[in-house]
Amino acid sequence: MLCNTQIEGMHFDISESASGSRTMATYDVKGGATEDFAPVPAAQRSASSDFKSSHGDPRVVDVNADGNPPEEVVTTVDELEASKKGRFAYFRTREFYVVLVLGQILALCVTSTNTFSSLLAAQGTSIPAFQTFFNYVLLNIVYTSFTLYRYGFKRWCRMLLKDGWKYIILSFLDVQGNYFTVLAYRYTTILSAQLINFFAIVTVVIVSFVFLRVRYHITQVAGILICIGGVGILFGSDHITGSSDSMSPISKGNQVKGDLFALLGAACYGLSNVAEEFLVSKRPLYEVVGQLGFWGMIWNGAQAGIFDKKSFQTATWNGKVGGYLTGYTLILAMFYSLAPLLFRLASAAFFNVSLLTGNFWGVCIGVKVFHLKIHWMYPIAFVCIIGGLLVYFVGKKVLGEATKPWLGKNQEHGVAGVGTARRRVVKGDTVV
């Protein structure tokens, strides 16, 4: 017997055999033995002591954004960036093509929702706030339910108390961006409203530069300007064909009001895009989109009840309207589900620039739906915009814009979610 001791009602006996192995038994003071521990050979004890002396004492580690212990890092950002060299390194990654295609899918989504809005208006149903309400309801049902499943009700409530104010602001900006942009088209020309929507890109660049410490390369600025030039060709084509003047005459007073609404909507869009890029880089995607749907449903419902009450009463309700609303809701929900992935893989700036091709896709859809004709300048404009998107990434390394300056050198302050650079760091060469 080597020793015996008693701690808080428990008695410990430790003995050593002739072979050098030790056995420990515990006894309840009022009872008998409660647990026997397997003997530990001396050689194993020596190895354990050597490990402790070389690696130090065990330490408590932090948890990541999901509430789980952080995953083991298998590489670093510098090592990933050094895997491919040259000014066109990002073009040789599959992430580049994912980003490019994803941007065009989102542009098609925007064009499709605009088409459904036009079809609803043609049926005599113009309820801009109310028709978006169903989108927030669907997002809330899908993503908030999944968040509750992952977190549990108590943890979800704690998340609301801690971060709810961030999502309230995000959803407010998003709802107002949607509302004021649609409202602008009632008072001003389509050409004027679309030109002012460029202010969303300006807002994103300025806010990201000032608050998120994003620094833009000269090729990124050149790419944005080339894309804007491509849209200028589209507007020139509209002016030549007279399609931009197809609306009824608008008074100067109403046009000024409409321009102000478009400016406000573009600013709200830009701010909400930057806020969402920041949040999805630090929190799980399902939490962010779920909260956007949860609070957006409340903001949008209240706004629809106040401003769309008369429009709702005079609207036409039939099978076609129901089908258009369903299509609008499903496509907009897909847009809200895919946009955070582009924010992670690229940025809010690239997201807005990618949507500039929406005018071209709108005409392509209009050829079939509204029997429009494609002017010869449209393909030139589309090629110009795509060229600008390519120039935007010249000089970018392997990770492109996936590395966020506010997350640390190895993105240690971010979540290892789908599309993030942090996921590449902890899982190696993978996108999902």
Image (cartoon, rainbow, N blue to C red):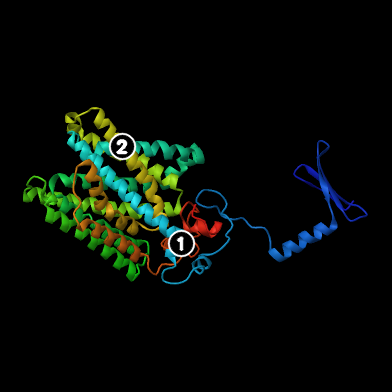
Q: Are marks 2 and 1 in contact (CB under 8 Å)?
A: no
Instruction: Identify which residue is drawn at 28% across, 60% down.
Output: 383
Instruction: Tell me the tag on residue 93.
Output: 1
Q: Residue 342 placed where, x, y %?
A: 39, 54
Give the class, few, some or many, for how many residues have Cα within 10 Å of label 2's Cα (few <14, many ≥20).
some
User: Disc 2 marks which residue?
Assistant: 327
Instruction: Tell me the tag on residue 169.
Output: none
Element type where label 2 sits in the image = helix
- The answer to which of 226 and 78 lies nearer the viewer is 226
Give the class, few, some or many, for how many residues have Cα within 10 Å of label 1's Cα (few <14, many ≥20).
some
Q: Is residue 223 left or right of residue 61?
A: left
- The answer to which of 414 and 90 lies nearer the viewer is 90
Tell me if residue 20 comes above or below residue 91 in the rendering: above
N-terminal of the pair, mark 2 or mark 1, is: 1
C-alpha gap between disc 2 and disc 1? 34 Å
Instruction: Please state which amino acid type lies under the numbered disc 1.
Output: Thr
Element type where label 1 sits in the image = loop
- The answer to which of 113 and 201 lies nearer the viewer is 113
Q: Residue 12 placed where, x, y %?
A: 82, 46
